[in-house]
Image: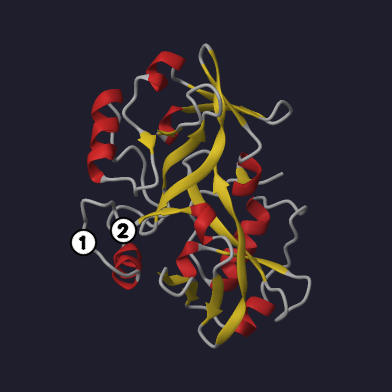
């Protein structure tokens, strides 16, 4: 199903033998829109350390209790190499985590598919492409992108307010755009298919769609269902491909 990324920050993370903290952030790959890491704030359990958890380890979400189950024990998390500091997540840290847990770096397909030209074009437009010791330039914080200005091909349409996350394959399925002063009181969903580039230096998301297309798109509000019927209508309007049709009740 689809979940607002912001709502996940309320959820407590439960290992197989007890709580380990709460969701702090989501780190995603900006060419594939795949969630690469869940950032967990361990609070007092590990002295306030933040640790990285692979999405493939996330189990059942209990929406009533607001918990996310992990297929990991407290000891496994405590002994893992993935503790964050103020430095970017390095390739070495990711490799150490993959080796420690035996995780597959290619555990899930991308939003666009493994060989998608769209993914390559987005990567080419998103800035530096070279891996550095300081971290992967395509590994980005969803929390940091919230607030970025969103530009259609012919003008500004608002800012990123949130993301809808597909918890079946852990993809960022849609950007939730608050159209603010341009279209007062309205929210729209934008698929990654429409994103030409993300400019981190100017805090902008650049789209391939027009303002008129956005105004004519199927209406959406945070409390509305984002089910298969709505998503097919949205994708049909923009002529976007489908990607799996999860839903948000």
- Secondary structure under tag 2 reads loop
Q: Which residue is mark 1?
A: 130
Say how many tags the image has.
2
- Left or right of 132: which side holds 56? right
Q: Say above or below: 226 vs 126.
A: above
Q: Which residue is mark 2?
A: 137
Q: Kindly identify the residue that appears in the image at 61 percent across and 70 percent down.
A: 159
- Secondary structure under tag 1 reads loop
The x, y position of residue 247, in whole percent, is 63, 46
The x, y position of residue 231, in whole percent, is 62, 58
Quick check: can you spot residue 247?
A: no
**Nearer to us in this view, 239 or 147:** 147
Q: Are marks 1 and 2 in contact (CB under 8 Å)?
A: yes
- Which corner quadrant holds the N terminus? top right
Q: Quadrant of residue 187?
A: bottom right
- Left or right of 230: which side holds 99? left
- Whichever of labels 1 and 2 marks the residue nearer the N terminus, that label is 1
Decide: few, some or many residues near mark 2? Use Cα within 10 Å; few <14, some 14-19, many ≥20: some
Mark 1 and mark 2: Cα distance apart in space: 7 Å
């Amino acid at each position: 199903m689809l979940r607002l990324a912001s709502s996940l920050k309320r959820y407590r993370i439960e290992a197989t033998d007890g709580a380990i903290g709460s969701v702090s952030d989501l780190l995603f790959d900006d060419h594939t829109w795949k969630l690469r890491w869940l950032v967990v704030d361990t609070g007092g359990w590990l002295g306030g350390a933040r640790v990285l958890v692979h999405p493939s380890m996330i189990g059942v979400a209990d929406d009533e209790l607001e918990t996310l189950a992990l297929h990991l024990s407290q000891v496994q998390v405590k002994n893992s190499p993935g503790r964050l500091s103020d430095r970017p997540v390095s390739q070495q840290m990711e490799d150490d985590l993959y080796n420690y847990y035996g995780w597959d770096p290619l555990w899930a397909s991308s939003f666009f598919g493994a060989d998608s030209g769209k993914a390559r074009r987005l990567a080419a437009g998103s800035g530096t492409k070279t891996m550095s010791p300081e971290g992967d330039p395509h590994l980005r914080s969803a929390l940091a992108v919230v607030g970025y200005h969103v530009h259609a091909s012919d003008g500004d349409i608002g800012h990123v307010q949130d993301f809808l996350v597909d918890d079946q394959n852990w993809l960022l399925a849609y950007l939730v755009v608050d159209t603010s002063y341009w279209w007062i009181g309205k929210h729209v969903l934008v698929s990654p298919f429409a994103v030409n580039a993300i400019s981190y230096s100017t805090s902008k998301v650049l789209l391939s769609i027009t303002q008129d297309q956005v105004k004519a798109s199927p209406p959406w509000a945070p409390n509305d269902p984002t089910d298969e019927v709505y998503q097919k209508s949205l994708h049909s309007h923009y002529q976007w491909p489908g990607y799996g049709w999860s839903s948000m009740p």
